[in-house]
Image (cartoon, rainbow, N blue to C red):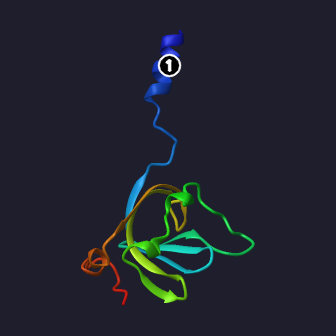
Amino acid sequence: MILLAAATLAALPSLAPAAETRCGWISNPTPRNWWLDDRDKTWVIMTQGPDDQEPEGMDLIPDISEKEYVRTNGNYGYACACLSVETDGDERITRIISFRQLKLSQCRNDKALKFKG
């Protein structure tokens, strides 16, 4: 009986969110505001304000200004990156699993992404 129950549970699809790889422009225009613009849409990573929700794994994003980076507002700006994430399926990144910053040219040359200066 226990083996049958274990086999039944193992056959059920996982209810855990699946990781997705999302690559594009990562923007940090002002404190605690982060977005990722990829080929599909703009994903909200975090916004400043009363509903400020920092996703798990936010600490995996290093200081993006230490590599190829475009400064747009004092110490703030944007870069090109790939992230492994979980999303709410709508517009929010709910968990960051990994982060890799890329050369700006990689996003600039990707015709599926909107061009940033």
On the image, the x and y values in percent for residue 48 come to: 67, 75
Total tally of numbered discs in the picture: 1
Q: Going 29% across and 81% down the picture, which residue do you hit? A: 108
Q: Is 99 in front, or is 24? A: 99
Is residue 92 something that shows in the picture?
yes
**Residue that label 1 marks:** 6
On the image, the x and y values in percent for residue 109 come to: 24, 79
The image quarter containing residue 22 is bottom left
Q: Going 54% across and 73% down the picture, which residue do you hit? A: 34
Q: Quadrant of the C terminus?
A: bottom left
Is residue 87 something that shows in the picture?
no
Q: Left of 108 or right of it: where is 83?
A: right
Q: Going 40% across and 79% down the picture, which residue do you hit? A: 69
Q: Going 48% across and 12% down the picture, which residue do you hit? A: 3
Q: Residue furthest top?
A: 1
Q: Left of 72 or right of it: where is 109?
A: left
Judged from the image, the secondary structure of the residue bearing numbered disc 1 is: helix
Q: Amino acid at mark 1?
A: Ala
